[in-house]
Amino acid sequence: MDKQIDKQPVIEIKNVWVSYDTQTVLEDINLTVYESDFIGLIGPNGGGKTTLLKALLGLLEPSSGSIRIMGKSVAEGRCHIGYVPQYIEFDRQFPIRVWEVVQMGLLGCRKPFTRLSTAEREVIDYALEQVDMAGLSQRPIGELSGGQRQRVYIARALTSNPQILLLDEPTASVDPQVAGIIYDLLKRINQSVTILMVSHDMNAVSSYVKTIGCLNRRMHYHGSKEVTQEMMNAIYECPIDLIAHGLPHRVLSPHESEGENHA
Ligand SMILES: Nc1ncnc2c1ncn2[C@@H]1O[C@H](COP(=O)(O)OP(=O)(O)OP(=O)(O)O)[C@@H](O)[C@H]1O
C-alpha cells in the first residue's frame, strides 16, 4: 500500500451497507481506490458487484456509510465517472448509428434539444478514435460484432472525459481473442483514467489489472494483485485454477485431501 502514498484517492468507500428491501447485499464495505489504479473486481454470482457499481453511480443509496468520488459527494462526483454497463440484448433493427450511440454519452451534461457544438462533435470523434472505431462511425449499431459494440459503449462512457471508468463484465459476450483487444484498449485508457472493472474472467484479471478485489457481500482488498488464499477461501471456498499465458496456474492451495499445492 505504501506505493499509493503519493497518489490521490479517487473513490473512498467507508463502512458502506446496501440492502434491497430487507435483504442486505453489501456489508461494511471499505475500499479506497487511488488514481491510475486498474482494479479487477471478482466474486461469485450474486456477490454484490453490480450493486456496488450502482451505489458508486448514485443509483442506490447505502443504508449506512459514506462514498466520496474525487473528494465529493456521489451526486457531485458522479460526473467524473464513465460507466459501461453489463451486456444487454437489444433490438438489432433499431435504427441508430455508432456515432449517435456515442453521442448519448453527452446527454447528462448538456441542454436537451440543442444543436451539438463543434467542440462536442470533436469529443465524440475523439472518443471513437480512442477505441479504434472512427472508421465505423456511420455504421448502424445492429451491424456490429459484440466486441465492436463493446468498444462503442466504452467510447460512449469516454465522452464525459471521465477520471474514473467503471465497467461491468465488459467481455462477457465476446470470444477470448476479442476480449484481449478490449483489455489492451483498457490498458491504454488506464494511462490517464482510473479503472474499476467487474469481471469473471480470471485470466484477464491476472494479466491486465494492477490490483484485485474480491466481493462476496464483504470486500477483500489488499491493494495488490495478489489473490490471497484468505480472499479466495472467503469467496469460493474451493481451489481455482487459472490458465494464464496458456499455462495452468493454481492460485489457491488444494483442499487438504488433494495433497501438495502444485502452483
Ligand atoms: N433490484 C433488485 N432488487 C432486489 N434484489 C436485487 C436487485 N438487484 C440485485 N439484487 C440481489 O442482490 C444480490 C447481488 O446482486 P448483484 O447483481 O449486485 O450481484 P453480482 O455480484 O453483480 O452478480 P453477477 O456476477 O451474477 O452479475 C443478488 O442476491 C441479487 O439477487
Image: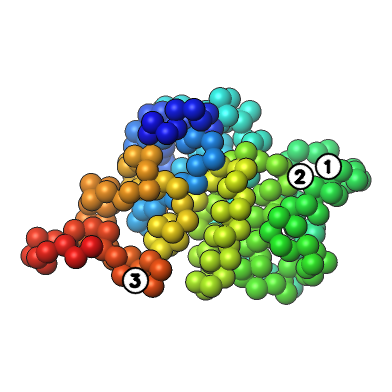
Element on which disc 3 rests? strand
Q: Nearer the viewer, mark 3 or mark 1?
A: 3
Rendered position, 37 above or below 254? above
Element on which disc 1 rests? loop
Residue at left offset 38%, top offset 39%: 223
Q: Does the Cβ of the disc 1 residue fall within 8 Å of ligand 1?
A: no
Question: Between disc 3 and disc 1, whose residue precedes?
Answer: 1
Q: Which residue is mark 1?
A: 112
Residue 257 shows in this picture:
yes
Element on which disc 2 rests? helix
Question: Between disc 3 and disc 2, whose residue precedes?
Answer: 2
Q: 191 or 109, which is in the foreground?
A: 191
Question: Label 2 near label 3: C-beta < 8 Å?
Answer: no
Residue at left offset 45%, top offset 48%: 210
Q: 72 or 20, which is in the foreground?
A: 72
Q: Amino acid at mark 3?
A: Leu
Q: Provide residue 145's location: percent of width, then percent of height.
A: 65, 73
For residue 206, side relative to residue 113 (left or right): left
Q: Nearer the viewer, mark 3 or mark 2?
A: 3
Q: Amino acid at mark 2?
A: Leu
Mark on residue 247?
A: 3
The quarter of the rendered structure image containing the C terminus is bottom left
Q: Which residue is mark 2?
A: 107
Q: Amino acid at mark 1?
A: Pro
Q: 237 or 206, which is in the foreground?
A: 206
Q: What's the distance in space between the residues labelled 2 and 1, CA to CA?
A: 7 Å
Q: Nearer the viewer, mark 2 or mark 1?
A: 2
Question: Where is residue 74, by image quadrant?
Answer: top right
Q: Residues within 10 Å of mark 2 (few under 14, many from 20)?
A: few
Question: Label 1 near label 2: C-beta < 8 Å?
Answer: yes
Residue 92 shows in this picture:
no
